[in-house]
Amino acid sequence: MAQNFMFKTETKRLLDMMINSIYTHKEIFLRELISNASDAIDKRHYLSLTDTSLQADYQILIEASKEHRTLTITDNGIGMTLEELQNNLGTIAKSGSKEFIEQIKDDQNKDAVDIIGQFGVGFYSAFMVAKEVLVFTKSPKENKAYLFKSEGLESYTIEETDYNDYGTKIVLILRDNDDDNNYDEYLDEYKIKELVRKYSDYVRYPIKTWVTKFVPSEEKDENGESKETEEVVLDTINSMIPIWKKAKKDVTEEELNEFYKQKFMDWQDPLLTLFTSVEGNVTYNALVFVPKKAPFDLNNERYEKGIQLYTKGVFILDKCKELVPDYLRFIKGLVDSSDLSLNISREMLQDDRTLQRIASNLEKKILSEFTKTLKNNREKYEEFFKTYGINLKYGLYENFGSKKEELKDLILFNTMNEDKPVTLKEYVEHMKENQKAIYFASGQNKEAVLNLPQVDAIKKQGYDLLILTDYVDEFMLQVLKEYDGKEFKSISQGDLDLLSEEESKEVDKIKEDNKDLIADIKAALPEVKEVVLSKRLTDSPVCLRAGDNLSFEMEKVLNAQQNGNGTMKAERILEINPNHDVFKKMEELYKNDKASITEIAKVLYNQALLLEGMPLDNPKEFADLVTKLLVK
Ligand code: ADP
């Protein structure tokens, strides 16, 4: 007697989506069912290692009946017990399906149509093409066989049935053709072959179907040639060779993209793909992908980096972190090496010399792929760098810059003069003849940096300026020290050395003449280490410069790392423009109104802080002083 069960709400929703789906790649149902079959065989195979009676010639069989309009997929895998049937097919087990449901919950499936295929909605996808699905199944864990039947609506039935072999047979009764869909095509031999090759070629077990073949017969035709007769035979239609074991020339970009999306659950093609096989010191095949979008938690400490590890085509480990340096944590992919032993354990991986050699070889290959992209496909590289540049920067900074030679030419910088980011090499190539250093300035964003008073001097010389906006940038340059013999120079630190000898002497003279005034300004500003006459300002009255040890940007970063409780302080040096009217006014006032110097000094210092994007020590005092000046 068949028993009737209701689908849970969540499942009903998913089924509903499948039935009403106008998704254009309904064909993925076959991939999903084959992948389930292959998993089921994996499970049986595993059991058979301890229970030899379960050994079998594993296969997945696809049979089409044009007469009955049925497509049947049979595997001799593990099958399902009654309980498993209910748990696995009666409810949504799969994380992919759950994620899918989550995704479409909010935005009433506007985009859902496009992404069904990428989530791998598993068994339920059958209802995109079938009006009724029958599942015959028998598990070695239970003596009985069962038949599950559903039209994908409210409910399903389960009854006992006769089924001899262990495994599962899924019969799809295809939907009627309509204006948009010709479901009959799934009964077509060529279509079945095409779909298997496209989606399931590397499945480890033979996928067989009945194919028509012309075979030479004994009979001869009138010309004496062997006559051919048509025969329908069972043929294996997948190559069973993992895609990464194939020759590069035999694999299309589309196949690689398809493989990536399926295997790593992405719905977009990868941004970059590296397909390589190495022989020599180490031997391995690798497929490495850079996803278009970084996972949201990529730079979270808990993010698990790593790529899959196979040995001789056998899956060993899902996230082998030893194969991926931290700064490449965003890559996905796999490595298959015959140099590693099959029973290598997780603990042993850490010190495995072969694995280390593979890792370092693969790292080089990946970096050279980046270099190639930078050279040949700038736009793509810029897109890549926008997403993952921060990781490369960390790579350069980490471990005391041990990777700086490899990475320095892969970093892109925004600059004052260019609309597009440039490499250091490009910056240096564009340097003016008399320009000695590579100038940089840090800030919240380009606009804020360009508002810094110190920028004027660089502009005046016609130099370009690197604009640093990532918090790791300055630390990275500090590690890098120089590029092509040119040192990096912050426009907010040290001596910029931009004036001619004459101009410089002139400033020194003004300084000499105003020694007392400058000393009094310094006395008014105890938080400032030094007050100097500027050799870098052209248009602005003042600017703030940091002492040589710590920059303002580093001060911000280091203090932020301690949740704002940090006490690191960069030395503050106030530079005053000797040629600005404000200074001239101060010279004037100093003669008969010394008292006001203190107030002006404070206002100027606070202005400089504001322009640097730094908090004022005493905003109230500043506001009061400005008000006082306004009514003067
Ligand atoms: P997923 O395969 O991702 O878990 P599905 O909805 O496709 O999601 O399948 C749900 C579960 O049903 C599977 O995890 C598996 O336990 C079981 N199942 C599906 N197809 C088969 C099969 N051919 N043989 C045995 N079990 C199966």
Image (tube, helix red, strand yellow):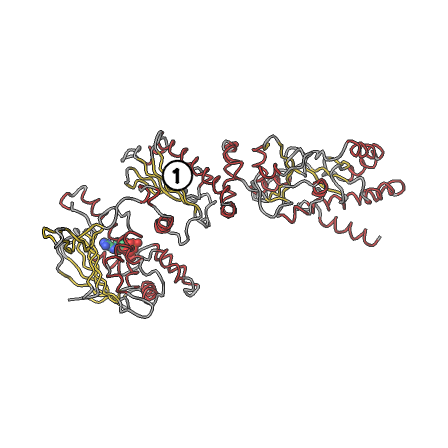
Q: Is residue 504 left or right of residue 313?
A: right
Q: Is residue 67 left or right of residue 435?
A: left
* x, y percent for residue 575: 74, 39
Q: Residue furthest front?
A: 223
Q: Residue furthest left?
A: 218
Q: Is residue 112 left or right of residue 68?
A: right
Q: In the displayed structure, would residue 625 be above or below residue 392? A: below
Q: Which residue is mark 1?
A: 321
* x, y percent for residue 53: 13, 45
Q: Is residue 94 left or right of residue 418?
A: left
Query: Looking at the image, which residue is at 42% across and 37% down?
Result: 365
Number of numbered discs visible in the structure rendering: 1
Q: Secondary structure at mark 1?
A: helix
Q: In the displayed structure, would residue 482 be above or below residue 4? A: above
Quadrant where the N terminus sits is bottom left
* x, y percent for residue 6: 26, 66
Query: Looking at the image, which residue is at 48% across and 45% down?
Result: 299
Q: In front here: 148 or 564?
A: 148
Q: In the displayed structure, would residue 631 be above or below residue 554? A: below
Quarter where residue 362 is shown: top left
Whether the residue carrying mark 1 lies under 8 Å from ligand 1 is answered with no
* x, y percent for residue 587: 85, 40
Quarter where residue 89 is shown: bottom left
Ligand 1's quadrant: bottom left
Q: In the rendered structure, which amino acid carries the disc numbered 1?
A: Lys
Local packing at callout 1 (Cα closer than 10 Å; few below 14, some 14-19, many 20+) is: some
Query: Looking at the image, which residue is at 68% across and 34% down?
Result: 433
Query: Looking at the image, which residue is at 33% across and 64% down?
Result: 18
